Amino acid sequence: MRENDRLDEISHRIIGAAIEVHRHLGPGLLESAYQSCLAFELKQLGLKVEEQKPLPVVYKQVKLDCGYRLDMVVEGEIIVEIKAIEKLLAIHDAQLLSYLRLTKKRVGLLMNFHVPVLKNGLKRIVNEFPDSEWEKRQAQAE
């Protein structure tokens, strides 16, 4: 199976599990409740789930613990950022994209459970460019 197909398949399974959680709980709870229930659903599907995974920042070859934590990493590949807020903003997209760049992962899912219909609170963010490619493009743009 091609890497893109594999990531798509895992993404679909995560989204299906999130819809199941939202169907049972609805909007209005804390992020931690949605995270715990989603982790349970994903584990029931046989997926590997890491919750509240620490994310150090590497600066000039020094690993710094800045207190960042990834809500969830599924199958070691997909970052899931969970929100329970009125509305997703551009800063939430930027946060997830930064996490993808720092971890050198390609796909992230941003999920806002504080909506009447979950599909209106879902975003898939793709990090198309590994750091070296991104840096080359930035240098060319300057």
Image (cartoon, rainbow, N blue to C red):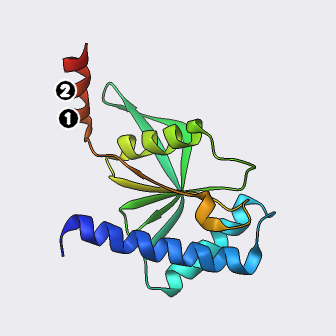
Find residue 122 and report its image quarter: bottom right
**Could you tell me which residue is drawn at 73 percent across and 51 percent down?**
85
Instruction: Locate residue 98: give its quadrant.
Output: top left
In the picture shown, does residue 112 fall above or below 48? Answer: above
- The x, y position of residue 100, in whole percent, is 39, 46
For label 2, count other residues whose C-alpha is less than 10 Å away and answer few (under 14), some (14-19) or many (20+): few
Q: Nearer the viewer, residue 67 or 105?
A: 105
Q: Nearer the viewer, residue 69 or 19?
A: 19
* Callouts 1 and 2 close, C-beta under 8 Å: yes
Query: Mark on residue 100?
Result: none
| Lateral position of residue 130 relative to residue 125, left or right | left
Q: Secondary structure at mark 1?
A: helix
Q: Position of residue 79 (x, y in %)?
A: 45, 57
Q: Is residue 122 left or right of residue 129?
A: right
Name the residue rendered at 73%, 81% in the picture: 24
Q: Residue at x 74, y 66 (%)?
A: 116
Per the image, label 2 sits on a secondary structure element best described as: helix
Marker disc for residue 133:
1
Residue at label 2? 136
Q: At label 2, which amino acid type do we have?
A: Lys
Q: Is residue 51 left or right of residue 32?
A: left
Q: How many marks?
A: 2
Classed neighbour count for the residue bearing mark 1: other residues with Cα under 10 Å, few (<14), some (14–19), many (≥20): few
Which amino acid does the dot numbered 1 rest on?
Glu
In 3D space, how far apart are the residues under numbered discs 1 and 2 (Cα atoms)? 5 Å
In the image: residue 93, left or right of residue 27: left
Image quadrant holding the N terminus, namely bottom left
